[in-house]
Every structure is written in structure tokens, then in C-alpha cells.
Amino acid sequence: MTGYAPLEALLTVGGPELSRLLHRTESRLAQVAETHGRELGGHVTHTLSAGGKRLRPMLVFLCGGSGAGEDLVRAAVAAELLHMATLVHDDVLDGAATRRGRATVVAAAGRDAATATGDLLFSRAFAELASTGREEAVAVLSQASSALARGELLQRADAWSDSVGEERYLERCELKTARLFEAACRLGALLGEPGPEAADALGSFGLRVGIAFQIFDDVLDVSGPPERTGKPRGTDLLDGTVTLPLILARRRDPELRDLDLRSIVTEPAQADALCDRIALTGALGEARELALTYVAEAKAALSDLELDDRRREALDLVADGVVERYA
């Protein structure tokens, strides 16, 4: 779990129990990979071993409360497998060569192998959750999966567009990223200590954290150093993905409004130059402020819940951490 500023503090606040549960999650993820043969299992292992923040499993456990049982571990594993499946499929669609500084499955083994790997991760996510015997939990993950697909279609439809506005962008953020954050929190409530009555509040927390996460992820695409983000600066621009920094920069710089992204950004050096131009408009600071607004709303969603001080502090750290990455 790299690049997440308050991780050490979070694990301290969460205590040995959180560390133990995350370790169980890693062990279970490894077991999933090992049961699918040398070739396909190897691709799954490659995907999972790339690491990541494991924020979705962490949210399952923090929302689930103390005394987490096997059902919560399975929910955490399911949330992470679904997340990994979307990354593999995204790489197929984008033809991405690297992710987190490592070769993608599609780059290393081809489109067919990568598509099969993503499909396997999807199926195993639902198999993990179905083993809990809780139909409502499977429904939560299913709804998140459908939202992910709709978000991907919107992003594809918006590629290279000069007319995408903030509202449309935020809708994509919700569907493609935040709904899985929301699902992780809901699963924690449903399968853990809080129960269904707390699912809406915790889900609202997760949804807002997820939107803030995506906004800041898009800020990092423009500002983040490749050695920390694991991808070249301006990758979204090269893909034609219109994100908030560009939307806001177009408002501030008239010459950017009519910029033909498809023709002017065709190689990394051009993307890097455009990143500099976007940064000069002040758009990155404005985008970060919007992300912070969603963080504040996420914390407010927990105000009426009866949470012990340690759990509330840990959830606040997660929310703060999405805009403190690489700090």
C-alpha cells in the first residue's frame, strides 16, 4: 500500500486487529490466484502483487467494526477482486503498457489473456461474496459492478470531447469509482457490527470519499511525478479522457477551450507540456478544493452514527488520505 500518506497513522489507530485482517485479505487473494492454473493464475498473481492501497478492503473492515468474522474478510476480498478486474479490463481498452510502474497483463500476454484474467477476477469476486449466503450483500456488489460498466461507457463516449462539463465529469466519477467505495462501506455495515440500519450513512461516506479520490487521482495525473504515480504524466490526456483539471483549465484559459486534444496530444512530450499549461491556470488548486469539499461531506455523513473514537478517527484518516497521497 504505497503512496498513501496517513497509512502508518491509520494502521496505528486501527490497531493490531486491522493489520491482522488486511493480512488475512492478502493471504486469501493469493489463494484465489493459486487455484487457477499456472498461466491464468500467474496473470492474476501478477495483477494482485502490483500492490495498491487496498482502500476498499480497509473500508470494509473499518465500517464492519470489531470482532470481524470470515464474512467480512470475504467481502473485503470481493471488493478488491472487483476493483482489480476493472483495472485489467481498463488496460485492455486503453492498450496500457504499464500500471504502478509494472507491465500490464495486456502488454505482457496479449488482449485475450488479459480479458480472460479480468473475467476471472470478476467471477471470483462474486463467488467470494456468494459464499457468505447473504443475498443482500451480493446485490450491493452487483449494483456497484453495473455502475462501473455504465461509468466506463460514459468515459468512452466523452473521449476527446471539448464539451464535457463538471456535472457530467462528476457523474462519471460516481459511477466508475465512488460506487465501489460505497459498496465496500455498505458491505461492512451489512456483514459486520453496525448492521443494515447504518448502511446508508456509511455508504454515503464511502460515495463521497470515492468521488474525492477520483478527483485527486485526476489532479495527480497532471501534477504527480511518474516515479510516484507509476504512470507517465498526462496519461489521461493521451487517452483522450477529459478530467476536471482540463475542464477547469478551459474555463480559465480561452485558448484551451478550442484545443483539439486528439490532434495536439499524440505523444508523451506533448501531454507533459499540456500538463504544465493546465497547472499554470490554477485549475489544480480549484480541483483539490472540490475534492476537500467532498471529504468534508463524507465526514459529516458519519455525524449521527454511534462510532467509538478509534473507528471515527480511522475513517476520518481514510477520508483525509485521499487528498494527501504522495504528500
Image (tube, grey):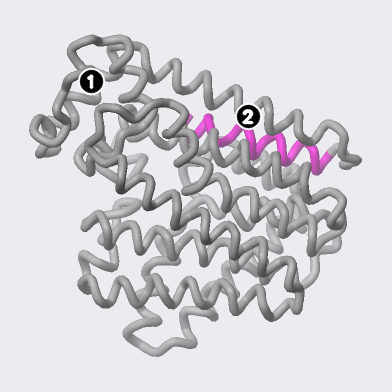
Q: Which of marks 2 and 1 is nearer the N terminus?
A: 1
Q: Residues within 10 Å of mark 1 (few under 14, many from 20)?
A: some
Residue named by callout 2: 295
257 to the left or right of 294: left
The kind of residue tagged 1 is Asp
Location of residue 311 with respect to 222 vertically, above or below = below
Label annotation for residue 176: none
Q: Residue 276 carries which label?
A: 1
Along the horizontal axis of the image, is 19 left or right of 161?
Answer: right
Q: Is mark 2 on a helix, strand or loop?
A: helix
Please name the predominant secondary structure of the magenta segment in the image: helix
- Amino acid at the residue labelled 2: Val
How far across and down, in percent of the image, does residue 118 sit?
Answer: 39, 70
Gap between marks 2 and 1 measured at Cα: 27 Å
Is residue 127 visible from the viewing direction of this image? Answer: yes
The answer to which image quadrant residue 132 occupies is bottom right
Percent position (x, y) of residue 280? 28, 12
Look at the image and give the residue range highlighted in magenta: 310-327
The answer to which of 316 and 24 lies nearer the viewer is 316
Using residue 161 as the reference point, say whether residue 293 is left or right of it.
right
- Residue appearing at x 22%, y 69% in the figure: 108
Residue positioned 78% across, 51% down in the render:
199
Residue 104 covered by magenta stretch = no
